[in-house]
Image (spheres, rainbow, N blue to C red):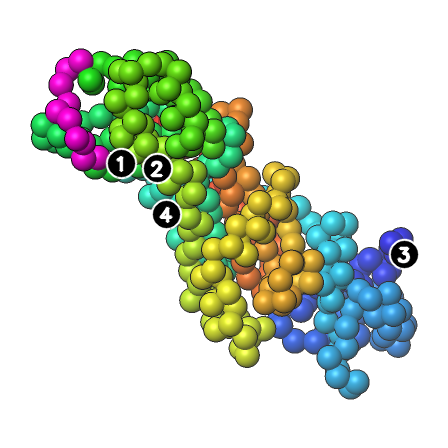
Amino acid sequence: MDLSERKQKILAAVVELHIESGEPVGSKVVVEKLDMSVSSATIRNEMSELSALGLLEQPHTSSGRIPSHTGYRYYVDHLMNKYELNDSQRKRINADVSFNEGDPEKLLEKAGEVLADMTNCAAVSTLPQGESVLIKRIEIVPIGARTAMIVLLTSGGVIRSRVCRLDFELDKSMLEVFYNITSASLVGRPVCEVSAVMLQTLAASLGIEALSMLPLLATVADLARDAEDTDIMLEGQSNLLNHREFSGSAQELMEFLRRAEPLNRLIAASKNELDVLIGKENLYRQLEKSSIILARYNIGEKEGGIIGLIGPTRIDYARLIPSVKYLTNLVGRLLTQALED
């Protein structure tokens, strides 16, 4: 959609004034903001044309205009000024998001809390997923003669453990067989490839000794499934109650966000380093008044997970997008340093 320079300036002014005030924007306010040598009537006519193009809406016949989701999209794609975080903002984020715990889940939980606090929106994040997540280590810790704890660590830093009860005594030779099988056939393999059927086939191909390991290998399969099915972490949902746009629908939105499947689908559909979904661009009716910013972090050269926020369409895109990107890059660096050590 091609807009004249004047229409672009007017649309940007309406978006920015509405983000600031939350109120419909009239032509006189636009004239004051732009300091243009044209009359209020001329601006009003231009705003009418922008409405006819679907970029602005008029909530009431006598009111000013507000951006439509298409207007916000045009603004984000073509008109938004690039904003950079200053040194103090970066230092604050760096100080708030540390990796002292050595636990990726706690790191992402903290990052979500920081993002929610910074933006007054709900923050969403995921641990690394997909084919890039490998089994990094499998340990077995004998607890009793016939009881052991299996511990699985992924390249994404996810740790899962489970107690396994056996029908036989776990001696040194059995432990050696277990480590030989897991080291040769499982460590370094993508977590998503490990299943009970795959391990049964593997054990059968390795002979009688390996078949005796089936209870332990079945536990490894369970842990791999648990590590792959990491939950979406959501922080700051109560912030949504602070936005007037959600005054009649905040509870429905919060209930919607508690359901894992819709958010999983949204995140799975996000394939770019940064995605901004505005209003009706979202897949679900409950998100028609919302905007979602999702950024992907990497661990080394491999894809990691997602960090993002959910708020009303009237969010300050120019400032929030750089905040999400900076925080995402920081988490990627911290995880890369920790998991490559």
Under tag 1, what secondary structure?
A: strand
**Front tag of 4 and 3:** 4
Answer left or right for 315 relative to 203: right
Tell me the number on the disc at residue 222. Answer: 2
Q: For the point 18% across and 31% down, which residue is it?
A: 166
- Tell me which segment is drawn in magenta: 164-173
Total marks in image: 4
Disc 1 marks which residue?
161
Q: For the point 63% across and 40% down, which residue is it?
A: 271
Q: Amino acid at mark 1?
A: Ser
Residue 36 placement (x, y as % from top left): 83, 64
Cα gap from disc 1 to disc 3, whole angstroms:
61 Å
Disc 3 marks which residue?
4
Between 34 and 297, the one lying in front of the other is 297
Mark nearer the N terminus (1 vs 2): 1
Cα gap from disc 4 to disc 1, whole angstroms:
23 Å
Q: Quadrant of the N terminus?
A: bottom right
Q: Quadrant of residue 94?
A: top left
Cα gap from disc 1 to disc 2, whole angstroms:
10 Å
Give neighbour class at mark 4: few <14, some 14-19, many 20+ (Cα, 10 Å). some
Give neighbour class at mark 3: few <14, some 14-19, many 20+ (Cα, 10 Å). few
Cα gap from disc 2 to disc 4, whole angstroms:
28 Å
Cα gap from disc 4 to disc 3, whole angstroms:
45 Å
